[in-house]
Image (tube, rainbow, N blue to C red):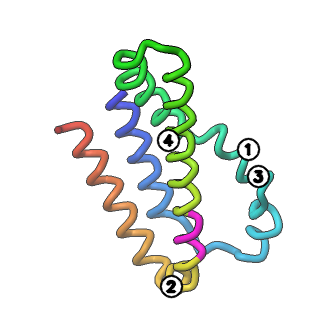
């Protein structure tokens, strides 16, 4: 799982570092809607890895009652939703700044992903 996660982060870093400037009009019309965002969350590998890791490592071994597990699953889903929601709010707030400094921002984000990938493999 560590290798898969590290390779995936390296792939994301490559895609971010080599991405071109976005065409805001085309992007907004095609992808910027609630339906697309909801569908995208079901194929989001980060969310899947988060859910599998938390349930298998912390929830199932420590809590045996099904009702308590269900309540904790709901709690974790709320935490995940709030994380995604705050990510979208901050993205909206910083959109103009990021568009102005897109190249520098993308390179910094790509380097942080490379650092994270290396730290996953060697820590």
Identify the residue under disc 3.
36
Identify the residue under disc 1.
39
Location of the N terminus by quadrant is top left
Judging depth in this view, the residue of 57 and 30 nearest the camera is 57
- SS for tag 2? helix
Please give the range of residues in magenta.
88-92
Sequence order check: which comes first, mark 4 or mark 2?
A: 4
Mark 1 burial class by Cα count in 10 Å: few <14, some 14-19, many 20+:
few
The reply to whether discs 4 and 2 touch (Cβ–Cβ < 8 Å) is no
Residue 97 is labelled as 2
Identify the residue under disc 4.
46
114 magenta-colored? no
Q: CA distance from mark 3 to mark 1?
A: 5 Å
The reply to whether discs 3 and 1 touch (Cβ–Cβ < 8 Å) is yes
Mark 3 burial class by Cα count in 10 Å: few <14, some 14-19, many 20+:
few
Instruction: Answer with left or right where residue 27 lies relative to residue 45.
Output: right
């Amino acid at each position: 799982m560590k290798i898969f996660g590290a390779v995936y982060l390296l792939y994301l870093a490559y895609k971010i570092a080599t991405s071109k400037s976005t065409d805001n009009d085309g992007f907004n019309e095609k992808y910027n809607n609630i339906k697309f965002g909801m569908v995208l969350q079901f194929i989001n590998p980060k969310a899947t890895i988060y859910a599998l890791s938390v349930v298998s490592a912390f929830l199932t071994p420590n809590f045996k009652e099904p009702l308590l597990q269900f309540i904790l699953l709901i709690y974790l889903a709320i935490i995940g939703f709030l994380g995604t929601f705050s990510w979208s709010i901050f993205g909206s707030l910083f959109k103009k700044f990021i568009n102005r400094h897109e190249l520098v921002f993308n390179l910094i984000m790509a380097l942080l992903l490379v650092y994270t990938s290396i730290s996953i493999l060697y820590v």
